[in-house]
Amino acid sequence: MKKLLLTALAALTIGSAAMAQKIDNSKDRRFQSVGEARNPFHTKSLGKGGTMVSDWFSIMDMIDQSNVGTSLTPFVNFMVHDSLAKNVEDDGTIRYGAWQSVGQVIDPKDDLINLTTSPQNQLSRFNSYKCDSIAFQYLYVRNVDSISDGMGGKTRVVDTLFVAYFAGSQIKKLSFTSSGDKLAIVDWDYTKRLPANYVTIEKILLDRGDNGIFDTTRCNSSNGGFENGWVTKIGQIPAPAGMQITANTNGSTTNNLVAMSYTFKSGVPTIVGQDTAVMIYSLNPMTAPTNMRRTNYFGCRFQQNAGATGWANQSFFNTSLFALKSTSYKDDGNANSWKGYVSGNAFTNDLFLESWFHLTVTGSIGAGINENDKVSISSIYPNPSRGFVKANFETKTTADVKVEVLNLIGQTVKTINFGNTAAGSYELPMDLTSLNPGVYMISITAGNSTTTQKLVIAE
C-alpha cells in the first residue's frame, strides 16, 4: 500500500486533579509498617501471538512506576466493626478505629502495566477473563483467646473475616466532575455494616494459629515490645465461581472489572455504651492498667502518596475501597454523598491497598491490546526521542482514527483526530518538544480497535 503523510496538529492539554473536593486523610498514616512480607508471586515471560495470560496483577506494581511512585509511604491500619475499641498511641493519645472495610478494584487494561515487568499482561476491552485467586498483606493479632461464658467457665474466642467478591455491573464507574478522575465503587449494607450486591461473601473463621490461610501475626518487638510497628504476612484465597468477565466481540463491554473487599469482626463482644476494649496499646506494656480489657484485631498494609503531586486516575479504574465510620453507619439521603465505600483516590493523599489478583484470559482472543488486527503500530522512531517523533501505523479497515499521547498517570497530553480514514499505512510526524522528559504512551485508535506503544522522551 502507498504510505501517506499525516500532518494534522492538535493543542497540548494537561489535566489536573481537583484536590479541593477530596477527603482529607492526612492522619490515617499513624501505624508504622516496619517490615513487608516478601512478594511470592513471580511474573512469567508470556508472549503474545495467541498465548493466554494467566498471571498475578497488582495495582502497586503499576503505581510504583507512576509519577507518585517515589512518594509512596507504607503504613498499616486496622478494621473495626460493631466495637468502639480504642487505640492507645505511643504518646498516650486515645483514638478510635475508623475503618470498617477495605478493598481493591483491578482494571487490567491500565496502560501502566506496560511499564511493569510484565507488559505483555495488559488486556483490552476485547479480552474475556476470570479471577482465579486474590491475595493481600495482612496482620491478624490475637490478644484474647477466651472470655467468660457467664457461668464460671471460659468460652473460646473465634473472630470472623468477611471476604466479598464483585464483578461486572456490581462495580459502579464514576468520576469527579472537575478533575476527571476515574472512581470505582461497590455497594454497602448500612444495616449489617457489610458489603452488598456481591458475587459471594465468604466467612473465614480465625482461631489461634495457622488456619491454612491466615496466621496470627505478632507485633514487632524491636521497640521493646510496644505495639507501634508490625510485620505483615500474605494470605491467598481462591476466588469463587462467577468472577468472570465476558467481553463483547465488538469491544463494547463496559462492565469489565473485578474487585474484592474484606471486613473483620472480633469475637470479643462489645459492651454497648461503655466499651473499654483496647485494640492497640503503643505505650510501654509495663504501664498498662491491671486487667486492661483487650480485643483482637485484623489489619492490612497500604501505601499512601505522601508527595505534593496527586495521582490523577483519569483513564482507568484501579482504585482502592474504604468504608469509614463516617460513611458506613447511615445513608444521609444526599445523592452527592458517599454511600458506604469511598474510592482511595478520593483522598487528599491517595491510598493503595497491597493486594494481588490472579487473572486468566478465557476464550480465543488471546492476550494484550495488540491482538485485534484492525490497527497496528509498526514503529515509533526515534525512541528514545528528544521530542520530534514519527509514528508508523497501519489500519486494515476504513474507520475514524485518533492518536493520543498519554503520560504515566493516564492523562491525555496530546490528541490528534483524523476523522474517517481509509485503510492503509501511514506515517505521522509529531512535535512533542513541549512535553517534559519522561515515559509516555502513544495510543492509536481505529474504530473500536486500539494499539499502544511506549515512547521515551529524553532530556
Image (cartoon, rainbow, N blue to C red):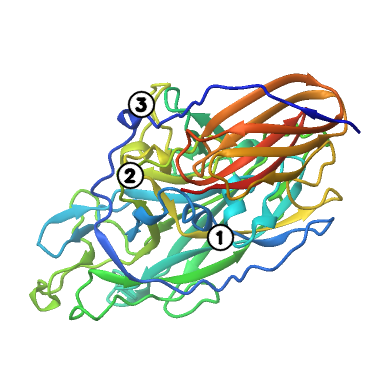
Q: For the residues marked 1 and 3, what is the alpha-carbon distance in whole angstroms? A: 34 Å
Front disc: 1 or 2: 2
Is residue 382 depicted above or below 388 in this figure?
A: below
Image quarter of residue 451:
top right
Residue 65 spot, x, y in % from top left: 49, 54
Frontmost residue, 39 versus 113: 113
Q: Give me the disc on residue 332.
A: 3
Q: Can residue 107 be seen in this view?
A: no
Dot 1: what SS? strand
Position of residue 392 in the picture relative to residue 94 (left or right): right
Dot 2: what SS? loop
Residue 456 spot, x, y in % from top left: 56, 48
Front disc: 3 or 2: 2
Q: What residue did someone put label 1 on?
A: 356
Dot 3: what SS? loop
Split into 4 quadrants, where in the image is the N terminus? top right
Q: For the residues marked 3 and 2, what is the alpha-carbon distance in whole angstroms? A: 25 Å
How would you rate the neighbour count of disc 3 (Cα within 10 Å): few for under 14, some for 14-19, many for 20 or more?
few
Q: Which amino acid does label 2 sit on?
A: Asn
How would you rate the neighbour count of disc 1 (Cα within 10 Å): few for under 14, some for 14-19, many for 20 or more?
many
Q: What residue did someone put label 2 on?
A: 349
